[in-house]
Image (cartoon, rainbow, N blue to C red):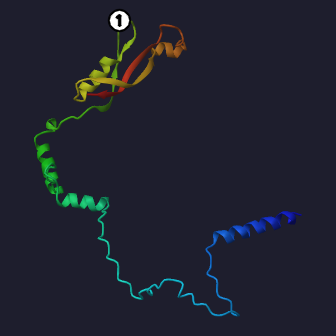
Amino acid sequence: MTSGRAAPAAAASLLLLALASPAWPQMPAASGPAVSTEAAAPAQPPPDPHPAPLPSPTPRENPGLIDELGKLLKNPPALLPPLKTPQQAIEDFNATLKGGAATLPRVGSAMVNGRVKCIVAGNGAPDCKAAADRLCRDKGFKEGKSVDVEATQSCPVKALLSGKTSEPGVCRTDNFVTRAMCQ
């Protein structure tokens, strides 16, 4: 057992506690003459039972995000345009539509779907840039870039019925632009 080690450790712990705790004043012995401790210590006034209240600190305003947004909406700065009511916004939108859909501005680019056949270039490769441009012009844009291209194999009926579709030159591959990014 470790009882031989426990006794010195307990003694060391008690010694540390004794050194770390504040000292208590010693009481005079009951058998000897009474010694007045008040004469040795300087006279201190007794503590006031009703201390004066401390002045309350001024409350520091620390509003949150919602409070700040509320202040902003109540007093909008001069840099922002005046806010419209929903009814005014609808009336403005309807007035824009009466002018024609062509007057609405096109912002950025748009993705359009369709199906335009790619022409075969002089080197035998498909030219899908021209097909993407045509797809975009059909939708009212200036030009475009192909995003999705679909390839299909076209074979004559005679080759399909005879099962000779694997022979070279019998079937041809057609490419179609099915989706384009237009500007």
Q: Tell me the quadrant of the picture where the C terminus can be found.
A: top left
Left of 12 or right of it: where is 132?
left
Could you say whether the residue bearing mark 1 is in a helix, strand or loop?
loop
Question: In the image, what residue occupies the spot 44% across and 20% down?
Answer: 152
Q: Tell me the quadrant of the picture where the N terminus can be found.
A: bottom right
Seen in the picture, residue 117 relative to 56 is either above or below; the reply is above
Residue 140 appears in which quarter of the rendering?
Answer: top left
Question: Toward the viewer: 113 or 16?
Answer: 16
Seen in the picture, residue 112 relative to 68 is either above or below; the reply is above
Question: Toward the viewer: 111 or 109?
Answer: 109
Question: In the image, what residue occupies the spot 32% across and 61% down?
Answer: 64
Q: Which residue is mark 1?
A: 122
Q: How many marks?
A: 1
Residue 144 appears in which quarter of the rendering?
Answer: top left
Seen in the picture, residue 170 relative to 98 is either above or below; the reply is above
Seen in the picture, residue 138 relative to 39 is either above or below; the reply is above
Amino acid type, residue under disc 1 in the picture: Gly
Question: Toward the viewer: 118 or 62?
Answer: 62
Question: Toward the viewer: 166 or 141?
Answer: 141
Question: In the image, what residue occupies the spot 65% across and 93% down?
Answer: 33
x, y percentage for residue 175?
40, 19
x, y percentage for residue 136?
27, 26
Furthest-top residue in this view: 122
x, y percentage for residue 97?
14, 43
Question: In the image, what residue occupies the spot 35% across and 18% down?
Answer: 128
Furthest-right residue in this view: 1
| Label 1 crowd (10 A; few <14 / some 14-19 / many >=20) | few
